[in-house]
Amino acid sequence: MRRLFPVTDRTAPAAAPPPEARPEGRSEGRSEAPVNLVDREWTLDELAEAYAYPAPLTTPDAPAPSDAPHRWLRANMVSTLDGAAQHDGRSQAISSDADMRIFGTLRGLADVVIVGAETVRLEGYCPARARDAFAARRAADGQAPAPAIAVVSASLNLDFSLPLFTSPLVPTLVLTGAAASPDRVRDAEKAGARVIVAGDGPGVEPDRAVTALADLGLVRQLTEGGPRLLGQFAAAGVLDELCLTVAPLLTVGSAQRITGGPVLPDPERFALAAVLEEAGFLFTRYRRI
């Protein structure tokens, strides 16, 4: 995996150099110069540095300067050259080994993974697991051993007998609206999930959802979709960063794009922050201007 070209990121410090290029131990800062690594597989530590969240972030237990973000929401999605976000209803068919390494890295850095109920059903979501490669980094940042999974659902039409709810390392969260069925709320809580009301009606309001999670100290936020949920976050103006894998594939058909929902009155502009490549797959990172 290699960086195709240097990108000056004006929204956050650039990624640190690889471990062999700096003193032993984790650097607290970030290099101001763009990284140019040789054409080889990156280590997980190098990927973690390249995809590090902005610092500092304000948390309930660790206040930061007044201009620091209260939370940071990034999305991780994959798309084919012709815009398909899935094939035969799942994203796995258009992914790659390198894409899955980045997928694991982004989870390894996050406090919480936010996902829509339909994606939970289609993709067969399991609890996030603790990974030794990220244990020291997470402990140093005061994070739980693994990110919590937060499921967004208005109807709470979920199978609460799944391991995602009954045996997660970190309790699963369910985000819903005030009009949700009391019986389904009780079912969720009985299964061990924590239910968070983030909307006055049947659905979830995106700004309230990300704020409620940040108020719990879950400020490093990651969403893996699906397209409808990502569209809602984008339309509400709460999406800070998009990590998009562009797969060198054509699927034709009528598969969903990475976002779904009504057209925005005005397109929202994002700035390119970084590009990596492996086997024709482009791993891009864009940040909201």
Image (cartoon, grey):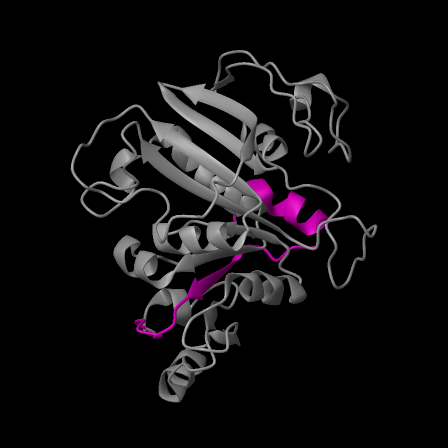
The answer to whether one can see residue 115 in this image is yes
Relative to 123, is 277 on the left or the right? right
x, y (%) of residue 241?
Answer: 55, 41
Quadrant into which the C terminus falls = top right
x, y (%) of residue 97?
Answer: 36, 31
Query: Quarter of the image holding residue 101?
Result: top left
Residue 158 shown in magenta:
yes
x, y (%) of residue 263?
Answer: 38, 48
Residue 140 shown in magenta:
yes
x, y (%) of residue 107?
Answer: 51, 47
Q: Residue at x 48, y 45 (%)?
A: 75
Query: Quarter of the image holding residue 30?
Result: top right
Q: Residue at x 64, y 61 (%)?
A: 214
Asked whether 266 or 188 is in front, the reply is 266
Q: Residue at x 56, y 61 (%)?
A: 207
Asked whether 212 or 46 is in front, the reply is 212
Residue at the bottom extreme, as displayed: 183
Asked whether 174 or 66 is in front, the reply is 66
Relative to 132, is 59 on the left or the right? right
Image: magenta residue range:
131-159
Q: Residue at x 49, y 12 (%)?
A: 39
Up-down relation of residue 59 to residue 181 (above or below): above
Relative to 250, is 188 on the left or the right? right
Residue at the right extreme, as displayed: 65
The answer to whether one can see residue 129 in this image is no
Asked whether 262 or 72 is in front, the reply is 262
